[in-house]
Image (cartoon, rainbow, N blue to C red):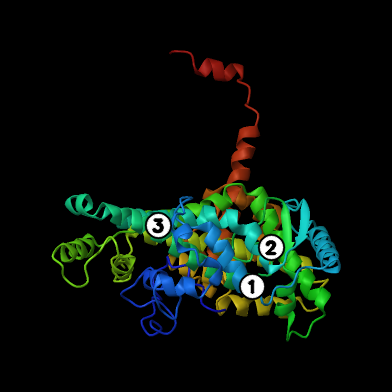
Amino acid sequence: MSDVPFGFGLPDRDPERRGEGGNPAGDPFGLGALFGGIAGGGSPEDLLGKMPLFAELQKLMSWSGGPVNWDLARQGAISQLAAGHQPSSDAERTAVAESLRLADLWLDQVTELPSGIERTAAWSRVEWVEQTLPAWGALIDPLAEKVVAAMTSALPQEAAMSFGPVAGIMGRMGGLMFGAQVGQALGKLADEVVTSTDVGLPLAPAGTGVLVPQNVAAFAAGLDRPADEIRLFLALREAASQRLFAHVPWLRQQLQDAVHAYARGITIDREAIERGITEAMSGMEGGIDPSNPESIQQLLGSGVLEPEETPEQQMALRRLETLLALVEGWVDTVVAEAAKDRLPGHSALAETMRRRRASGGPAEQTFATLVGLELRPRRLRDAATVWAAMGQSHGSADRDRLWSHPDLLPTSDDLDEPLDFVARQGMDDELRALTADDAEQPAQPQTPEDDEGQQPG
């Protein structure tokens, strides 16, 4: 998948790959690209000039709806999709509805979690952008707000008094440029997602099962399987994900909380801000000029965000990776059980999905560019091992019972030794059974001899 620069994540942690399409080491959160234009470089005005729809710069700079200009994001994403946009047909909507209904019937036989789909939809790429914006806002706004707030709060008090407009310009430019960058990212994602849960989170309105027919067809290109079989395989994945998120009410919030916990650790190099202010006050080249957004752009792209992660951020990333892996592993497991005797090409399709993830699918790119998380393929395999072994050893009911509370789920350490975790579940079950037997054992009545033995001598 092509790079999706949301502009928040750390650079590629592999030094050999830095500079090869990734963020430079001195620009850890991608803000050089964010405030310097799209990947090809250029000023904010250059970026806007590439999109005639956004010629009214003054109007865009007056955005006051939050840290991300979502109007700009929506327009930017849709403008990218205009050339190849294909509205969904009635036949495609019917085929999607039938596939999702059949998928739910099959899943009823392999999981205790009931259906999470109340309605079905066949979205075009443009509809995917428009319908998922509320979910993206809940995920991204706190990140963007933290970045902008950290920048403005880093201004020294004496400088803020002299350069008061700087904070306002930073905020407006943040909304503008985050909007442009997020719009570009969503436009690229819309070219690739096949369902509403393809990024690892449910993005559709609650109870809505979705396929994107144009992208399903692109996914199927080159695969030697019938189109209806491929569509049904993807419908199984969507229906399984919908069950999980519909009936594990804390899951979505825990995933978002992990992203936002990472955001709370974002820090600013105050010395770099102070140097820019001081140089501006001294008339030196490279200082901040409140009347010149270009100077602010250059400062924001100069590495003022600290690249080091705090221990709290590392814990948040570890928790996020574990949750995403557990969701993906559970979906893989129940889909395999539902499809193994019904879809002849299931194994080949499952392998295609694994290769897609390994090469950077929508979920991998989304979280890599938001928070610098690299979803390790091994971690996904370990999670799938846990769920498959739990089902084989203890049955689907005990397997799915682990979702009843976050404390019951395997931890990152548990995934290092997945079969040991499954074995411990068996011992825990035996202990609970013994405890229950002891509680149900009737008390033995006292005999007269017992009473006599208790009399004082």
Could you classify mark 1 by the number of other residues whose Cα lies within 10 Å: few (under 14), some (14-19), or many (20 or more)?
some
At label 2, which amino acid type do we have?
Glu
Query: Where is residue 182 drawn, in percent x and y?
Result: 51, 65
Q: Which residue is mark 1?
A: 81
Residue 353 vertical position relative to residue 60 in the rendered view, above or below: below
Q: Residue at x 52, y 51 (%)?
A: 254
Comparing 411 with 186, the one in front is 186
Q: Residue at x 48, y 13 (%)?
A: 455
Check if mark 2's residue and mark 1's residue have beta carbons within 8 Å. Answer: no
Q: Which residue is mark 2?
A: 127
Q: Nearer the viewer, mark 3 or mark 1?
A: 3
Q: Quadrant of residue 302?
A: bottom left
Mark found first going from the N terminus, 3 or 1: 1
Dot 2: element: helix
Q: Nearer the viewer, mark 3 or mark 2?
A: 3
CA distance separating discs 3 and 2: 28 Å
CA distance separating discs 3 and 1: 26 Å
